[in-house]
Image (cartoon, helix red, strand yellow):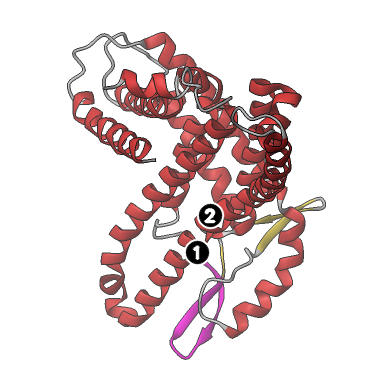
Amino acid sequence: MKNFTHNLFYRLAAFLRRLSNSLFPSRQSTLFPAAMRLQRIILALLLALVPACVGWAAEDQGHGAASHEAEHTSGLPTAAPVLFRVGPLPVTNSMVLTWTVALAVILGAQIAMRKSALVPAGAQNFWEWMVEGLEGFLEGLIGKHLVEKTFWFFGSLFIFIVMTNWSGLFPLVGTVGWGQQGAHGFHVTHPLLRGAHADFNMTFAMSLVFFALWLIWAIQENGVGGFLKHLFAPKGATSGPLFVLMVVVFFAVGILEVISIAFRPVSLSFRLFGNIFAGENMLESMTHLGGPMLGWLTALPFYFMELMVGLVQGLVFMLLTAVFTLLICTHDESHGSHGDDGGRSGH
């Protein structure tokens, strides 16, 4: 565990140092591999349109609760209000922001790579630095083999989460919409836009997508039998009565592991949702604390903190999902071709 933590911080520092190197694009760009990876990320970002719709039934049921809650509280309601409907599908303000951010990221990447050059500059340099930096960072943690299989998802996940977290800090998000006059002025109860990850349905949908991909990758790497053996089979060389005892023990441990795996989407969802939801409520409270004239000033220091929180939460979500994938795809303790070799190559 100590070596893994050291490797994690080493790779994180190396990833951040590459930012300074990107300002001096004297090296030859790995144009075509980077462009291929960027195209896969753009396609993966289209998945952002799917998770936003997964929780539409919960959004519909929570609409009445959101309206009732908005009448009795001054903070952000837990359920995102429904703006309009497309047939039976309710469209909430968090879904609108999700689609807007996904479209902006896709268009930005397409425009940046429209006129690619062997020596990158400007927007192309930024996108290639980000994609190659993320790929190198993950390769040092989970190995080259898993990166080739999973980077399209983990890279897209990090970019999407950070962009949506930061977009929730824009002035028009949460401040323009429908509301009512109160004792402390006009209060927006149904904003036109809402932070995407301040909606639990969005974070839970992303976790479910990862869980489905995690199961697919686990079976691809281990097979069905190997996947079950990874969970329930005894580890180590034993024989005789001790082997029988180890079978019983590891079968019980496997059951606990299955329960733990089943709760991973919930823990991932609540971690991201709780931090972003609490941050938006804190910003609103600080704004009301300063009053109509100084509200922007009392909230300003917390905006910088939320910028860091948005970046850290994107990194944490990506790292946890990557480590979960590494753990299930590592065949045994001596298996080093995927994770260890990639980590040692950087040293």
Three-letter amino acid code at the position of disc 2: His
Q: Label for residue 277? A: 1
Q: Say what secondary structure mark 1 lies in.
A: helix
Where residue 231 sits in the image (x, y, percent)? Answer: 68, 36
**Is 284 left or right of 232, judged from the image as shown?**
left
Q: Is residue 60 above or below residue 284?
A: above
Q: Per the image, is 183 magenta?
A: yes
Residue 175 visible in rendering: no
**Is 210 left or right of 280, judged from the image as shown?**
right
Residue shown at 37%/36% (left/top)?
4
Residue situated in front as seen by the camera: 284 or 4: 4
**The C terminus appears in which quarter of the rendering?**
top left
Q: Which residue is mark 2?
A: 197
Where residue 226 sits in the image (x, y, percent)? Answer: 70, 25
Near mark 2 (Cα within 10 A), the count class, few <14, some 14-19 or many ≥20, is: many
Magenta stretch?
A: 176-189
Residue shown at 47%/48% (left/top)?
164
Q: Residue furthest front?
A: 240
Residue 8, picture quadrant: top left
**The N terminus appears in which quarter of the rendering?**
top left
The reply to whether dot 1 and dot 2 touch (C-beta < 8 Å) is yes
Where residue 145 sits in the image (x, y, percent)? Answer: 50, 17
Q: Is residue 19 above or below residue 295?
A: above
Specify the principal SS of the magenta part: strand
Where residue 253 sits in the image (x, y, percent)? Answer: 66, 46
How far separated are the C-alphas under marks 1 and 2?
Answer: 7 Å
Residue shown at 26%/20% (left/top)?
121
Q: How many marks?
A: 2
Three-letter amino acid code at the position of disc 1: Phe
Q: Per the image, is 209 magenta?
A: no
User: Nearer the N terminus, badge 1 or badge 2?
Assistant: 2
